[in-house]
Image (cartoon, grey):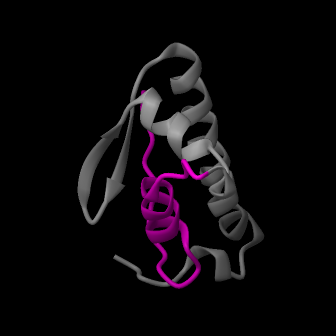
């Protein structure tokens, strides 16, 4: 497996695919909340189910006091510039 960050690709389609995957993951989250279903994400090579309630908690802004560490874990670890990884979403 290639460990280079795809966002640094010289191919603009490949570099842009990262942002497209993030949009798709956020879209899956929105649909899961609207339909009260769960999504699966991959963290540390393990599949983790996030319920609609988990996703709602994650979507609250940090200043609300209800911001969940799960959001930082999912998006910080999977999508942070210093720790490239993959976000897998499914309904």
* Residue furthest right in the image: 12
* Residue furthest left in the image: 46
> Where's residue 59, x and y in %?
61, 43
Assign the C terminus to one quadrant of the image: top left
Q: Which residues are magenta?
A: 65-91
Residue at the image point whose x is 44% and y is 61% from the top? 86
Q: Is residue 5 above or below residue 70?
A: below
> Where's residue 50, x and y in %?
37, 38
Q: In the image, is residue 22 part of the stretch drawn in magenta?
A: no
In screen coordinates, is 90 left or right of 44? right
Residue at the image point whose x is 56% and y is 33% from the top? 28
Q: Quadrant of residue 25?
A: top right
In screen coordinates, is 50 left or right of 44? right
Q: In the image, is residue 88 part of the stretch drawn in magenta?
A: yes
The one of 78 and 51 positioned closer to us in this rendering = 51
* Residue furthest front in the image: 65
Residue at the image point whose x is 50% and y is 63% from the top? 72
């Amino acid at each position: 497996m290639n460990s280079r960050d795809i966002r640094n690709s010289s191919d603009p389609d490949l570099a842009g695919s990262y942002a497209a995957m993030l949009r798709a993951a956020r879209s899956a989250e929105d649909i899961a909340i609207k339909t009260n279903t769960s999504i699966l994400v991959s963290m540390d090579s393990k599949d983790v189910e996030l319920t609609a309630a988990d996703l709602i908690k994650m979507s609250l802004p940090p200043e609300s006091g209800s911001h969940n560490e799960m959001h930082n874990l999912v998006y910080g670890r999977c999508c942070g510039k210093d720790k490239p990884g993959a976000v897998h979403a499914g309904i």
